[in-house]
Image (cartoon, helix red, strand yellow):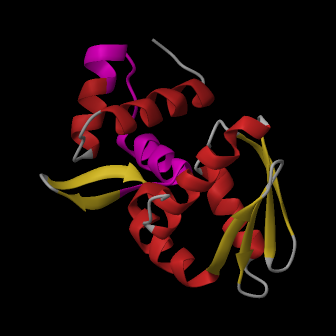
Amino acid sequence: MTLSKQQRHFVIKELIQSRSIGSQEELAHVLVDEHRVHVAQATLSRDLSELGIVKAPTEDGFRYVLQEVALAPLMKQLLRIEITGISSNESTVVVRTLRGRAPGVSEYLDRLGNPDILGSLAGDDTVLFIPSSHTRIEAIVAWLRQQIMGETLG
């Protein structure tokens, strides 16, 4: 079966996120066996690079993961330093950061894809989160503290 590059990328990303794959050979076999997609090694290598898929150590050896997943522990450590506070009222959530770090913090948090957050707006040292509903404010604050700061709300 011939897939467009976009379709192939979608399938590869789904496979990497749904199972433990440790080599390009293994990925190529899964693509052929389960999706009837034949792809040259050079093309597969380029696809992995374009998708930001890297090999990272896991409990069962080195496996392919999205680069952002591999960087997540490092990013969380960095964000613990960059984030100076999380507060809210009945309509918004505000994350305070070190000066100049709000855009990067906002970008990272947006990529986590919390469905309770419609969007964010970053200034120099402040990120404003717009919730999907005012009833989700506490859930967003708890999620931010758990995901980024390693805290639980309480």
Query: In the drawing, does residue 7 fall left or right of residue 70?
Result: right
Q: Residue furthest front?
A: 154
Foreground of the two, 118 or 143: 143
Q: Residue at x 76, y 74 (%)?
A: 102
Q: Is residue 43 part of the magenta span, yes or no? A: yes
Q: Is residue 154 above or below residue 20?
A: below
Q: Is residue 152 part of the magenta span, yes or no? A: no
Foreground of the two, 59 or 138: 138
Image quarter hosting the N terminus? top left
x and y percentages locating residue 43 in the rendered image:
46, 41
Q: Residue at x 40, y 68 (%)?
A: 73
Query: In the drawing, does residue 46 fall left or right of residue 111?
Result: left
Marker count (numbered): 0
Q: Residue at x 67, y 38 (%)?
A: 116
Q: Residue at x 43, y 55 (%)?
A: 69
x and y percentages locating residue 52 in the rendered image:
51, 54
Query: In the drawing, does residue 84 fall left or right of residue 56?
Result: right
Magenta part, dominant SS: helix
Within the image, what quadrant is residue 6 found in? top right
x and y percentages locating residue 10 in the rendered image:
53, 29
Task: Identify the magenta region.
Answer: 31-54
Q: Is residue 40 above or below residue 23?
A: above
